């Protein structure tokens, strides 16, 4: 399907989080024509980001200025989040590490500009200038604007948790092509538990810290009331089966959504294959996403980023933990075994 309304075709890398999609985003960013956009959708309040009714540009801009309270809670406690590349230590930076920094600025915009505060201000102005319209139109216009502003010709968005809302992406962007990157479920779940944001977020979503509305305002209130519990959770290793079940749920939701997309518009890629055979896999991804060929050397630069498979963690678990994790991951693993890749 061609792009809608003369805008650029939508292209997405979707995954579960901790599946290797950050590496793939960095590899795609090696092409001078590609705006590789990190985590644009994942940081927008889930009760707003795929609303169907028209909204004004002012409201969109306001939502883009919101922090994600889970990220804020982790950063201000000194935990590292590798996706965040905002220059906190720059004396001219607007935000300090403990501030509630807008998610879009901290991750997406900071990846594509040496002056992220200035570019983010321009982006908000561009959003405010848009008329009242549905969010699918807002997003297309804003991402097209950012593509032009950064001197690129296409955009590819990648969010770590996007398998959970791939159904909405396909509805908002009917012309989209999807690269689905996935990794062994056990190792993905273990990586999730080591990643501070998910180490906290998954227990919160599962109610281990009490009933919480997982909205921006709900999480702000949760942080205000539960600072000690957050400290304790981040310092602990919550039950691994929580992360296995979380992974399986995202796989189930995402695979179901992708099954409703035309087969020609979906490419399933194993992370393990990407890092063991980067050249042929990246050539396949580039052809599938119709990436411009004007930058002749980008694939070589992209593949140079690969450092092989991360060390496995599963064998270090106790037999009881292994059994619980295996059981939690089984639904997702069963689905992945049936994929055409």
Image: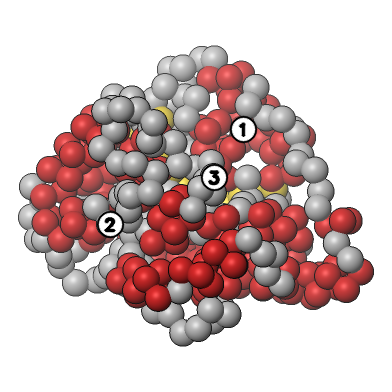
Distance from Cα at disc 3 to Cα at disc 1: 29 Å
Find residue 151 and report its image quarter.
top left
Secondary structure type for disc 2: loop
Find residue 202 and report its image quarter.
bottom right
Depth check: 210 or 147 in front? Answer: 210
Secondary structure type for disc 1: helix
Q: Which of marks 3 and 1 is in front?
A: 3
Which residue is pictured at 81% across the width and 53% down the height? Answer: 313
Residue 214, x across and y down, in percent: 41, 74
Which residue is pictured at 30% across the width and 71% down the height? Answer: 217
Q: Which label number is shown at residue 282?
A: 1
**Label 3 sits on residue:** 80
Near mark 1 (Cα within 10 A), the count class, few <14, some 14-19 or many ≥20, is many
Depth check: 126 or 191 in front? Answer: 191
Near mark 2 (Cα within 10 A), the count class, few <14, some 14-19 or many ≥20, is some
Q: Which label number is shown at residue 66?
A: 2
Residue 59 drawn above or below residue 103: below
């Amino acid at each position: 399907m061609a792009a809608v309304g003369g805008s650029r075709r939508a292209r997405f890398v979707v995954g579960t989080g901790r599946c290797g999609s950050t590496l793939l985003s960095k590899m795609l960013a090696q092409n001078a024509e590609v705006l590789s956009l990190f985590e644009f959708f994942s940081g927008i309040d889930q009760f707003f980001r795929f609303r169907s009714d028209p909204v004004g540009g002012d409201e969109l801009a306001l939502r883009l200025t919101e922090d994600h309270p889970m990220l804020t809670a982790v950063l201000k406690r000194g935990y590292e989040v590798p996706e965040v590349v905002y220059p906190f230590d720059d004396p001219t930076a607007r935000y300090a590490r403990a501030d509630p920094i807008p998610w879009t600025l901290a991750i997406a915009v900071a990846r594509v500009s040496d002056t992220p505060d200035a570019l983010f201000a321009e982006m908000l102005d561009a959003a405010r200038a848009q008329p009242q319209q549905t969010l699918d139109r807002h997003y297309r216009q804003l991402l097209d604007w950012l593509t032009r502003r950064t001197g690129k010709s296409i955009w590819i968005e990648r969010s770590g948790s996007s398998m959970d809302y791939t159904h909405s992406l396909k509805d908002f962007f009917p012309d989209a092509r999807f690269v689905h990157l996935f990794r062994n479920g056990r190792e993905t779940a273990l990586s999730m538990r080591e990643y501070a944001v998910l180490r906290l977020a998954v227990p919160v979503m599962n109610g281990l810290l009490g009933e919480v509305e997982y909205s921006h305002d709900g999480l702000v209130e949760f942080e205000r009331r539960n600072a000690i519990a957050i400290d304790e959770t981040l310092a602990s290793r919550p039950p691994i089966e929580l992360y296995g079940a979380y992974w399986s749920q995202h796989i189930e939701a995402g695979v179901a959504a992708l099954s409703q997309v035309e087969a020609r518009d979906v490419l399933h890629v194993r992370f393990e294959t990407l890092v063991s055979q980067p050249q042929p896999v990246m050539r396949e991804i580039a052809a599938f996403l119709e990436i411009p060929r004007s930058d002749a050397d980008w694939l070589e630069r992209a593949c140079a980023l690969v450092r092989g498979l991360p060390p496995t963690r599963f064998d270090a678990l106790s037999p009881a933990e292994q059994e619980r994790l295996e059981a939690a991951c089984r639904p997702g693993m069963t689905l992945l075994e049936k994929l055409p890749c």
